Image (cartoon, helix red, strand yellow):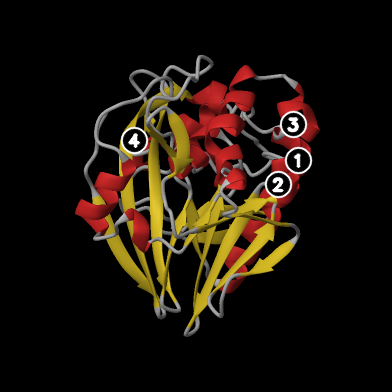
Amino acid sequence: MADESTQGFMIGDVEVRRVVEWRAPYAPARELVPGAEAEVWEGNRRWLSPDHWDPETGRATVALQTWVLRSAGRTVLVDTGVGHGRERPGNPFFHRQSGVGLPARLESLADVRPEDVDLVVNTHIHGDHVGWNTHDVDGTWTPTFPEATYLLPAADDHHFGPRGGYGGGVRPDDRLTYEDSVAPVHASGQARLWDGHHRIDENLTLEAAPGHTPGSSVLRVASRGERAVFVGDLLHSPVQILRPECSSCFCLDPEQAVASRRGVLERAADERELVVPAHFGGAGVVEVRRRGGSFEVADRTP
């Protein structure tokens, strides 16, 4: 489902703009988050539907989106979606996509041209987060953002790259993703690997949050006393805030993902960080509060 929507807000001095590529019912909700029992979906039907869950079909509603940050005089992209013309036989939503691409959306919705982008942050190396790292130029995958440095988690680059056997060959799409969306960025000299903790500027910091993938990471924003955390795929659905012990079906190390998710949610609740997941529908952002030994969604307004 195409979606031309955009929205913007400020976190202190950092401007944030959301560019949505598409939003649609995706996988069956209880397959996407296998540990979340039917009662948690039905018990929260009033606010989960329709932005996060379609009770008629039982499918989780997700968005594919890129976040544009303007910080300290630079333009930063957080994740780059699926890309066009990719061979992704393991996922029909991502396979051989076409239509209005991210560069056109960025220009029309956020006034950002490819050459304006200074940094690309890939929170992890999955096909729906690195796809527009590159585009096809006369049959060759070429970096889409010619002036940008691409920040890649070193642990993911190792796992999904040739040294790690392209994810161990478990999913054929992993090799395809690396070869068309990551390797060309290395070849151009634009890739920069980081591990553990990486400060981008006075407002932006990357931190490792492994589990979903070995190098899964979060981007923290702190400016003028305001805070946000871009959590990538630590959260696929708000039910994982209510049930942080439930990992998605895509998490390679579910137990580690639980630990990372709890740590991020605890800090978000304690420090009043706005939580920005990669795939939430609705407003795309949530506020989290503690509820006993777990958490609740404090702001449920679409």
Q: Is residue 292 visible?
A: no
**Badge 4 vs badge 2, beta-carbon distance below 8 Å:** no
Residue position for label 1: 158
- Dot 2 lies on which element? loop
Which residue is depicted at the point 24% across and 35% down? 100
Front of the two marks 4 and 3: 3
Query: Amino acid under label 1?
Result: His
Q: Quick one: which residue is furthest to the top in this view?
A: 89
Front of the two marks 2 and 1: 1
Front of the two marks 3 and 1: 3
Query: Amino acid under label 4?
Result: Ser
Residue 54 appears in which quarter of the rendering? top left
Residue position for label 3: 162
Q: Earlier in the sequence, mark 4 or mark 3?
A: 4
**Badge 2 vs badge 1, beta-carbon distance below 8 Å:** yes
Residue position for label 2: 215
Residue position for label 4: 49
Which residue is depicted at the point 72% across and 47% down? 210
Query: What is the C-alpha distance between the residues marked 2 and 1?
Result: 9 Å
Q: Quick one: which residue is furthest to the bottom in this view?
A: 224
Query: What is the C-alpha distance between the residues marked 4 and 3?
Result: 42 Å
Query: Amino acid under label 2?
Result: Gly
**Badge 4 vs badge 3, beta-carbon distance below 8 Å:** no
Name the side, left or right, on which 287 lies relative to 99: right
Which residue is depicted at the point 65% across and 35% down? 247
Residue 129: image location, x then y, percent: 50, 41
Badge 1: residue crowd in 10 Å (few <14, some 14–19, many ≥20) = some
Q: In terms of depth relative to the viewer, which is nearer, 247 or 195?
A: 195
- Dot 1 lies on which element? helix
